[in-house]
Image (cartoon, grey):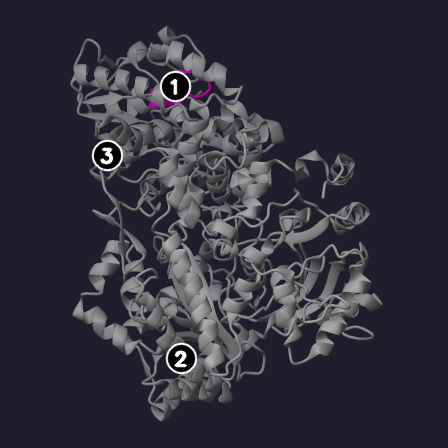
Amino acid sequence: MALEDFRADALRCTRCTYCRWIPFDHVKSARFARGCPSIEYGKFHAYTAGGRYVTALSLMDGRSQVTDKVRDSVFQCNMCGLCDVSCKICRYDMEPLSAMRELRFTLVQQGHEVPQAKPVIEGLRKQHNMLRKPAAERGQWAADLRVKNLATEPAKYAFHAGCRYSFDGDLGHVARTSIRILQKAGLDVGILGARESCCGGRAFNMGYRDEMEARASQNLRAWRTAGIETVVTPCSDCYHAFKRIYPPETGVELKVVHMVELIAELVKNGRLRFSRSVPMRVTYHDPCKLGRQGEAYVPWNGKEKKIFGQAVAYDPPRPRYSGAFGVYELPRDVLRAIPGIELVEMERIREYAWCCGAGGGVYESYPEFAQMTANDRLEEAEATGADALVSACPWCERNFTDATAGNGSKLQVLDIVTLAGRALELEEEN
Amino acid sequence: MEIPREAYQAIEDIVGKDNLTDDPALLDSYAFQWLAELVRPNRSHYMPRPWAVVMPITTEEVQAVTKVCNKYKIGIKPISTGWYHWAAPLKDDVPTLQFDMRRMNRIIEIDEKNRYAVVEAGVIVAQLQAEVMRRGLNVNIIGAGCSTSIVASACAYFGSGPSTYYMGHNSDNLLGQEWVAPSGEIVRAGSLSSDCGWFCGEGPGPSVRGVLRGHMGSRGGLGVFTKCAIKLAPWEGPPLLEPQGPPPAYRLPIHENFRVYTIGTPNWDAWADTYYEIYDNGIGYIFHRQFNLAGADLAAALWLTYLDPKGTMNDVEKATQDPAVQAITERARISFQLILQGRSRADIELQDKILDAILQKTGAFKVERFCEQDFAEFTNMYLQRLGHKHCNFIWVGGYMGSWMQGGTPDFAKQYAPIAIAGFYRDQKSHKLVECGGDALMGAGSTLTGGGYFGLEQFVSYDPADNDSIDACVKHMEDAIADCKQHNLPLGKEHHYLSIGWTDEEIWEGLAKMPQQFVLRFQSKIKEAFDPNSLGDRNYPTIPEGWAPSHR
């Protein structure tokens, strides 16, 4: 695709502003009706999906040039996809999230990169991770675990820890607990260790398509060599990359599961049994990449056609990613299955969840914006009376943890794997 | 006209640099407006680009910025949520400052006992409705839906919707008002003008409420409305709407105090009679001809597909071939949606009996498939929150409403066949969505008191296809010709097209208005509140000394 391919979408945008809000049917209060962190930060209409359609048109038609303000309006967005869900409540012919991504690709190709992103991407190119850490240290999180090294031993499951769990000292325990859970369930699992590479998903969403392809190529080659059947990851960003980005970009469809899906399945089929009570009131934050962006990939290669004279349809029918079929219930099933846990819901959940703030390169490039977004979610979580905000993505957890440190919130920020580990008496405390 | 840089700096000093922009690409996101391509040269999707966009956060900031505009003769145009080409500046050669009101987003007060709320211009209806429902109250939602600003719809535009039948038109619901006139004066009107609070729409002297809005409102042409109080209505449903199911067709379980129906009628006479009977018997909470926006030929296929979260437009096409769907299409051809609200189970049961008696009398009937639980719950959600109004654009992204003359149901039933025939004729170009000649959608009782109806023809065209845009414009011109031929007042298409006309063309039209004193009165108002003529012609006047050409 190229930006020009989204011209018709842009011309068909009606500036309705639905992309700013959660689907209106779900508005439960004035305070938490807002759905788009970007416009809450950037204020002007250009900071919405609809506004970015206009920016794309304006640039394509030579009505304007890329200035620093334009660049910020494009990249000060978490790429959380709430706009995509809200738009598609009423539209079958729009793909705002894809269009915004294409606008980013175009700006990056033209050299309009965000200065703060450059060292991160340079680190990715050289060290194959998003945290600018030495590639050789990637597998150290598992140094004291007895787990297969896929470079030398075959296994059915490849456990992909991802950059954040691999290098973030505060979060590495989640990866280790994950391995213990998989082993307790008797699964044949291995890791690539230092040969694991960043999934490339974050770079892709930051506008760096080539860098994603390079990382995908390395991972796919390694898994192919190891002969693995399934990739399992506790990281929602990686999950999304493998499930939704790799197939159309590389032509390779993997069998990929998120840790929480696997735990839910293992509990359901009796291979795991939560034995210890974890008395705690928790609320669950749906990661964007596991939730509304976590729907199954459906191959499609078609074109627009007109029916009823001018209505838009597709030949063959185009898959509809509306957020309806993301991974929402399984994490909740896991939480509900843990003795002692009381699950309370926030106002904005499932396909209309508020973003954690870390996505789309915002954590790396615009930390103040990332914190603003996280603080909004923490306030919403606190309103439930929960003791802990639980998620299933290390980027959410990192950003929320940073925010609690900054705003004095007493909420605990936990990964769902941590709670499962506690209930299985496997958790390794950080 | 070149505006000196010091003007920009003066405004920046008031609101801060983060709340003002003149970046061309950012300005284009305000110039790009729905319907622009119907009226702008070369089918451009852009209205005139604002000189700058400002985001004030207080009334005092609005006032201070307005004073700068007066000093430097900068045009003024507010936008809240913005959904129409007339929300943008109207002239390329008049530097205009667009006031984006979204930072003024506070609900200032909800007076539960006296049933009103005070809000700023950036508050949308969905936000207020969610808050007042917790208190057993509700708010009228205009036809454009819950994404719209309450202040804009109450102070500056028409103000009717499905709930108007019960809750009243916003010309009545508007209570105290706060307005920064183009002169820079803060006008506090209604009871507010006597320092008596927000509770009443009228204050001492002539009706300022009438000055600032009248029937159609000034649509941004007369300064910036910053706050208003709005009347609230009783709500006997749950304090929290808790929709069920996946998108897009969220379903709202029907509370025991409510009934949700789609009512079909055998002909337009029965349709009007049924309306009158329902109104006269004092039942009904929401009355709307909603789903026909998709066109009577396609509505059943579309909405039944819409219920399926995996459904696509291709499935709509398939559904039209299904004999069962075809039967529903015919059954629902002349239909409307009705929601009843009772204050108790006994009350709602009584209303149900009354409705059944009315249907028996008029020959109307419940459209069975649309009254089944899944569709009724979807209807309930759709109409109680009115959060799917972007479905107006569902076919291809372009929709233009023609007709919509307000009148009694008997009047509406007379023009419906003319509007239907004209739309069938224009669909033969194959450049409009062929949804059937009857895509007439509208609210029952668009003004308080019943007996007032408007039906708007939903014309869907492809904004990415100039031939389709041309076909839409031709339909608009045809609709005007149809109205003239049948001695009917002109409809919405006329309003839309006039945005693209020259001043002289506008004045020529105004000069033919039957009540010329209105324009003289408005000229005096403009003189008083907008001495430097910074508002635009959405507030219509004829300049002194101008004479029609008698062409």
Instruction: Estimate the spatial distance between the alpha carbons at disc 3 and disc 2, rounded to whole Å.
Output: 65 Å
**Residue B478 seen in this snapshot:** yes
Decide which of tag 3 and tag 1 comes sooner along the chain. Answer: 1
In magenta, the rendered stretch is A163-177
Do the dots labelled 3 and 1 sit on one chain? yes
Q: With respect to residue A400, does B267 lie above or below?
A: below
Q: Residues within 10 Å of mark 2 (few under 14, many from 20)?
A: some
Return the mark for residue A163.
1
Residue nearer the viewer, B470 or A55: B470
Write down the chain letter for disc 3. A
Q: With respect to residue B147, does B520 lie above or below?
A: below
Q: Quadrant of residue B209?
A: bottom right
Q: Given the image, on which type of amino acid does mark 1 rest? A: Cys
Q: Given the image, on which type of amino acid does mark 3 rest? A: Leu
Residue nearer the viewer, A209 or B386: A209
Which residue is labeled 2 in the image? B418
Name the spot of residue A75 as percent of width and height, x first: 50, 30
Do the dots labelled 2 and 1 sit on one chain? no
B129 on left or right of B61: left
Return the mark for residue A266.
3
Q: Residues within 10 Å of mark 3 (few under 14, many from 20)?
A: some
Q: Secondary structure at mark 2?
A: helix
Name the spot of residue B211 as percent of width and height, x first: 73, 70
Q: Please state, as top left, top right, bottom left or bottom right, where the C terminus of chain A lies in the image.
A: top left
